[in-house]
Image (cartoon, rainbow, N blue to C red):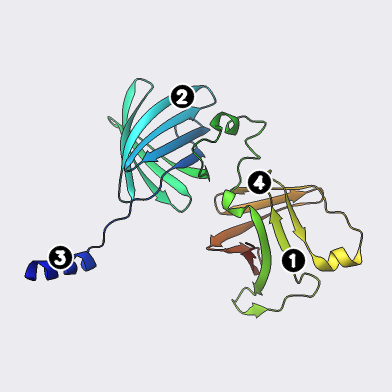
């Protein structure tokens, strides 16, 4: 009976470490300015490939232990030992070969390890593929805050606004007031992300804001006010 009580106590004090999901496709500067790293997981084991400048490609293997990925890879006649950790939607990877070290922060651009990585490194298409996939969908304006955090009334002219972000790199903001009172046709537009920055461009202007996603809420932070958008199901 004492052993059972001790086991229960240890379980409560030391909950099991849940292995993180490293599967997906990441891009960033690892061995060159533009790499694509793909990882597939089977249990705690990971097999991955690194594609460099759409030419060099090699395989690596690793193991997931809790929140850390460790393994080895061979490239340019060198054996590299590496460690990786997920930070938000990015992979921080640190590599060592003898006295040489490399470190890179790779952006996760897809949870699908079957995505065509060669296309991602094509200069003609890579800009369109540089968007945070979690942004894709429809987001309805919920509230606005002043710089001091106090609530700001939503003007009737933007009430009911919906941010529609598409996987092809385009976006559209639907505002009922404008739709009812004009024949205005929305301009051609596109979006992309870089770290925590969201850039939107159309025929008239380009705009970059800080963004954050918390659960089903998109938070946009322009210079003066913060807007909150709830994702539609």
Task: Confirm or deny contact between disc 1 and disc 2 (CB under 8 A).
Answer: no
**Which numbered tag is attached to residue 201?**
none
Task: Please state which of the two labelled residues, at mark 3 or mark 4, is closer to the viewer.
Answer: 3
Taking the image as shown, residue 19 lies to the left or right of residue 54, namely left
Residue at image mark 1? 161
- Give the SS element for disc 4: loop
Q: Identify the residue at horizontal 26%, vertical 62% (top origin).
A: 15
Task: Confirm or deny contact between disc 3 and disc 1 (CB under 8 A).
Answer: no
Residue at image mark 3? 7
Sequence-first tag of 4 and 1: 1
Sequence-first tag of 2 and 3: 3
Q: Identify the residue at horizontal 38%, vertical 21% (top origin).
A: 76
Give the percent coordinates (x, y) of residue 46.
36, 37
Position of the N terminus, as image quadrant, is: bottom left
**How far apart are the alpha carbons under marks 3 and 4?**
49 Å
**How far apart are the alpha carbons under marks 4 and 2?**
27 Å
**How far apart are the alpha carbons under marks 3 and 1?**
54 Å
Sequence-first tag of 4 and 2: 2
Taking 75 as reference, is 120 above or below it? below
**How far apart are the alpha carbons under marks 4 and 1?**
20 Å
Residue at image mark 4? 167
Give the percent coordinates (x, y) of residue 139.
66, 62
């Amino acid at each position: 009976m004492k052993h059972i009580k001790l086991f229960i106590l240890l379980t409560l004090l030391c909950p099991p470490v849940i292995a993180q999901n490293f599967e997906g496709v990441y891009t960033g500067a690892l061995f060159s300015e533009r790499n694509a790293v793909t990882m597939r997981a089977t249990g705690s084991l990971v097999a991955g490939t690194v594609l460099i400048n759409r030419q060099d490609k090699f395989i690596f293997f690793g193991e997931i232990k809790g929140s850390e990925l460790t393994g080895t890879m061979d490239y340019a006649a060198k054996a590299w030992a590496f460690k990786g950790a997920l930070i938000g939607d990015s992979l921080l990877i640190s590599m060592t070969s003898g006295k040489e070290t490399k470190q890179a922060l790779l952006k996760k651009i897809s949870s699908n390890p079957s995505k065509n990585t060669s296309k991602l490194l094509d200069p003609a298409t890579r800009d369109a593929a540089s968007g945070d996939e979690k942004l894709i969908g429809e987001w309805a304006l919920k509230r606005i805050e002043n710089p001091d955090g106090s609530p700001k009334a939503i003007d009737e002219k933007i009430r009911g606004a919906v941010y529609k972000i598409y996987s092809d790199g385009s976006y559209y903001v639907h505002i009922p007031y404008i739709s009812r009172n004009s024949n205005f046709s929305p301009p051609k537009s596109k979006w992309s992300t870089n770290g925590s920055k969201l850039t939107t461009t159309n025929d008239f202007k380009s705009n970059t804001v800080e963004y954050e996603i918390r659960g089903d809420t998109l938070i946009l932070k322009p210079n003066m006010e913060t807007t909150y958008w709830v994702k539609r199901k």
